[in-house]
Image (cartoon, grey):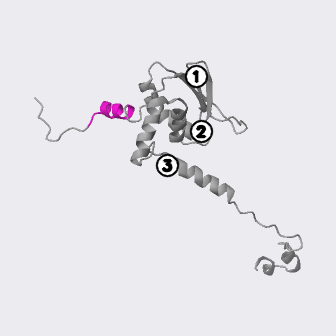
């Protein structure tokens, strides 16, 4: 008979997985019939890739009857298409969300704003009343997007020198010979 351990065992792997799947807010998408994600197989679309890893299992757990398809397509340097998420709604409409350059938390928020329903609106009001972020990690994504826009708008333009001001680097070499031509 094995001895009893003196320590209390930690949470099991299954309980950790269930905790992650049940983490609020519950992504209940009642009016969505299907979801199709399309992104690059490798080297691009990192926000979409993280969304598939972090949020898609939670969406599947909360909506077991939803038809979910993930298309990982090869993308070369000459290809210019962007990652997309296509939502097939119960009424027959289709909505397409552009995922290019977005964090996984931004993608999740956009999906929930599009198809989250009343429970999502209640969650947002609750979090805003408490002064908490709507989704953990979303404030970092918004800050980064804001900084990127600011950087692009403030890029300094270098004044070009007139041709008369330009100095020919080889002019010094033409008048001197030997070591003097190399040294300043």
Q: Residue at x 46, y 33 (%)?
A: 120
Q: Quadrant location of the C terminus?
A: bottom right
- Quick one: SS at disc 3? helix
Task: Evaluate if marks 1 and 3 touch, with contact meaning CB atoms under 8 Å apart.
Answer: no
What segment carries the magenta color?
Answer: 11-21
| Quarter containing the N terminus | top left
Q: Where is residue 153 shown, x and y percent of the image?
A: 68, 56
Pointer 1 local density, CA inside 10 Å: few below 14, some 14–19, many at least 20? some
Residue 117: x, y in percent? Answer: 49, 29
Residue 139, label in figure: 3
First in sequence, mark 1 or 2: give its number: 2
x, y percentage for residue 81? 69, 34
Name the residue located 18 percent from the left edge and 39 percent from the top edge: 8
Instruction: Tell me the tag on residue 45.
Output: 2
Q: Who is closer to the viewer here, 111 or 181?
A: 111
- Lateral position of residue 166 relative to residue 79, left or right: right
Which tag, 3 or 2, sits closer to the chain's start?
A: 2
**Numbered disc in front, either 3 or 2:** 3
Q: Camera-side residue: 182 or 31?
A: 31
Q: Nearer the viewer, mark 1 or mark 2?
A: 1
Of pointers 1 and 3, the one earlier in the residue sequence? 1
Image: 106 above or below 37? below
Percent of width and height locating residue 58: 43, 30
Give the secondary structure at mark 2: loop
Q: Dividing the picture into quarters, in which one does residue 180 lie?
A: bottom right
* In the image: residue 115, left or right of residue 178: left
Q: Which dot marks residue 120?
A: none
Q: Which residue is mark 1?
A: 88
**Image: 124 above or below 165:** above
Q: CA distance from mark 3 to mark 2?
A: 20 Å
């Amino acid at each position: 008979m094995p001895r009893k351990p003196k320590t209390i065992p930690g949470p099991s792997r299954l309980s950790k997985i269930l905790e992650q799947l049940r983490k609020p807010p519950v992504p209940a998408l009642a009016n969505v019939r299907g979801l199709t994600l399309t992104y690059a197989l490798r080297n691009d679309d990192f926000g979409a890739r993280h969304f598939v890893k972090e949020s898609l299992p939670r969406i599947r757990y909360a909506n077991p009857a939803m038809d979910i398809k993930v298309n990982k397509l090869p993308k070369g340097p000459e290809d210019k298409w962007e990652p997309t998420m296509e939502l097939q709604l119960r009424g027959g409409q289709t909505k397409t969300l552009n995922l290019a350059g977005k964090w996984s938390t931004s993608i999740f928020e956009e999906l929930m704003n599009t198809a989250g329903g009343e429970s999502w609106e209640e969650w947002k009001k609750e979090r805003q009343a408490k002064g908490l972020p709507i989704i953990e990690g979303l404030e970092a994504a918004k800050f980064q997007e804001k900084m990127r826009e600011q950087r692009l708008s403030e890029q300094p333009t270098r004044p070009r020198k007139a041709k008369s001001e330009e100095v020919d680097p080889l002019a010094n070499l033409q008048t001197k010979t030997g070591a003097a031509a190399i040294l300043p």
